[in-house]
Image (cartoon, rainbow, N blue to C red):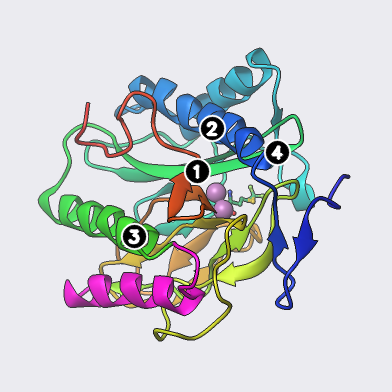
Amino acid sequence: MDNTRGRLTKDGIRIYDSADFAGMHAAGALAARILDDIAPLVFPGQSTEAIDKRITELVEESGATSATIGYKGYQHASCISVNHVVCHGIPGPKTLKDGDILNIDVTVIVDGWYGDTSRMYVAGKLPRKAERLIQVTHDSLFKGIEMVRPGNTFGDIGHAIQTYVEGHRMSVVRDFCGHGLGRVFHAPPNVLHYGRPGTGAVLEEGMFFTIEPMVNLGRPETKTLADDWTAVTRDKSLSAQFEHSVGVTANGVEIFTLSPGDKFHPTWT
Ligand code: MF3
Ligand code: CO
Ligand code: CO
């Protein structure tokens, strides 16, 4: 694997070249387009494995590779996390019910570059409480993204997300975080969705990473089920997540995984 581009900071974070943004843009755009294309497949009575099967086909049809099939033994092209599942839900035969909310997370590899994004969907009618959770989670991701510029720190990103979420009396999951990516899936740093301003590594132009806050209506604690993947809220409260892959530019941020059809939020159709 070619991980040797650019240089590493003292915190072990890779700094990519300006030409590398094009590779990330292509990978991110494909992942986002796939999430747009599967939106009509989310409806009551549908199984999550049927959605995943279509994602697998869309990745193959585009000539890209799924980053998750074969990753640490994972067998699917997506993670589909329904209701109180926080993340890493495994697609299966269980069917969606009216009012279920779900996160679908897709990572593709295009010419060696990784594009990682997830967003929320609803089967049928969106319940009022779930709508509030989804809106706060979505907006918290953008509070974090707004902090992305050279000279700010990863603690500034986490603090912006945490303050926003807790201000709405919801909680930020601590057990999972965002990550550096580029020519690899998961690289330094851990991008925490909570923290204190001015702490952590300083952002530099050419860093690529994800921001992917998981927000619970109840308490933040999670547990992992016996399948060793599915993470759920301990108190069974609803959980939501949105994820973008971003790059630090000279003046701010480039979001690599923007929805080409403006379908990033379940109520924007
Ligand atoms: N896409 C997830 C992330 O945001 C990782 C999924 S790994 C898998 O980092 F194996 F569960 F698919
Ligand atoms: Co990720
Ligand atoms: Co992801």
Secondary structure under tag 4 reads strand
Q: Is residue 125 toward the left or the right of residue 206 in the image?
A: left
Nearest to the observer: residue 238 or residue 262: 262
Q: Quadrant of residue 90?
A: top right
Q: Secondary structure at mark 1?
A: strand
The residue under label 2 is which amino acid type? Ala
Q: Residue at x 34, y 27 (%)?
A: 45
Could you classify mark 3 by the number of other residues whose Cα lies within 10 Å: few (under 14), some (14-19), or many (20 or more)?
Answer: some
* Residue 191 horizontal/vertical position (percent): 54, 68
Q: Cβ–Cβ below 8 Å for labels 1 and 2?
A: yes
User: Sequence order check: which comes first, mark 3 or mark 2?
Assistant: 2
Q: Which residues are magenta?
A: 149-170
- What residue is at 57 percent from the left and 58 percent from the top? 205
Q: Is residue 123 above or below residue 197?
A: above
Say the numbered circle drawn on residue 113: 4
Q: Amino acid at mark 3?
A: Glu
Q: Disc 3 vs disc 2: Cβ atoms closer than 8 Å?
A: no
Which quadrant would the N terminus be assigned to in this image?
Answer: top right
Which residue is tagged 2?
A: 31
| Ligand 3 closer than 8 Å to label 1 CB | yes
- Give the mark toward the camera: 3 or 1: 3
The magenta stretch spans residue 127: no
